[in-house]
Image (cartoon, rainbow, N blue to C red):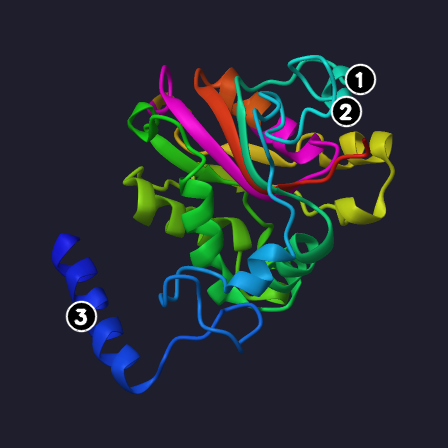
Amino acid sequence: MKAHRSLQRLVRFFLSIFLPERCPLCGEEPPMDDSPDMFCKNCLMSMQFIHGKPCPVCGGDINGIFDTCPDCLAEPARPWKRAYAIFRYKEGAAVAVRKFKYGKEVALARPFGRLLAGTIEHPEQYSEIVPVPLHWIRFIQRGYNQSVLLGEELSRWTGIPLKRRLKRIRNTKHQAFLEKEERKTNIKGAFSVRKPEQIKGKRVLLIDDVMTTGSTLAECAEILTNAGAIVDIAIIARRQTR
């Protein structure tokens, strides 16, 4: 694995001599550190980072006097311990996530994975990165699972192994088109755990691209918890109403 990474760095070095890197989002400006693993300065300035102490429940901005954000205070307890996020889902970050998720801009996994890795505290505590899976029909339609690509990059930067521990056993409607209560019903029973005996007692990092109501993450986290795992979550962006 180390030899493979060293070869990748060497190839990138020689390519950078003849083909200067460009931002994977805009394709115009050079990345902040001239590497393919980062956005350019202008693109980063268009994205709203989570600032200050994040909400431990969703990873978003707290925006209040409590230790938990107003959105999470209005929700029941979540089946995970803590959460990590990079951006608020708005402005430039929302554009970038949509390009990554729906626009086949798979190169965006690199800067997203690198930035997300920077938010993870004590990565050595995690036994596995577990991506939220796609149903095989959705995978054929899209051509890739953005959560897996994100997880692979996060694994590269943190050293936490990625395991496709979850399986989507029921194809569901797009969550984005449903109301809050409809999302919970739509996603119920949509996942199963592969070899649940292998994660009993382990701390895992469940990852997805965006958290809105958290219904999908909650369903996945619940079945992992029922299998005996301790679950934290990591996302690119949090959509907050407040």
Name the kind of residue labelled 2 in the image: Asp
Vertical arrangement, residue 47 with respect to residue 84, above or below: below
First to last magenta residue range: 198-220
Residue 216 lies in the magenta stretch = yes
Q: Secondary structure at mark 2?
A: helix
* Disc 2: which residue: 71
Q: Image height check: is 47 above or below 79?
A: below
| 3D distance between C-alphas at marks 3 and 1 | 50 Å
Residue shown at the point (45%, 56%) measured from the top left = 111
The three-letter amino acid code for the residue at tag 3 is: Leu
| Residue 96 placement (x, y as % from top left) | 63, 60
Residues packed near mark 3 inside 10 Å, few (<14), some (14 to 19) or many (20 plus)? few
Q: What residue is shown with label 3?
A: 10
Any mark on residue 112, and which?
Answer: none
Which amino acid type is shown beneath numbered disc 1? Ala
Contact between labelled residues 2 and 1, with CB atoms less than 8 Å apart: yes
- Badges 3 and 2: C-beta atoms under 8 Å apart? no
Q: Position of residue 4 (x, y in %)?
A: 17, 61
What number is the disc on residue 74? Answer: 1
Give the secondary structure at mark 3: helix
Mark toward the start of the polypeptide (3 vs 1): 3
One can see residue 38 in this view: yes
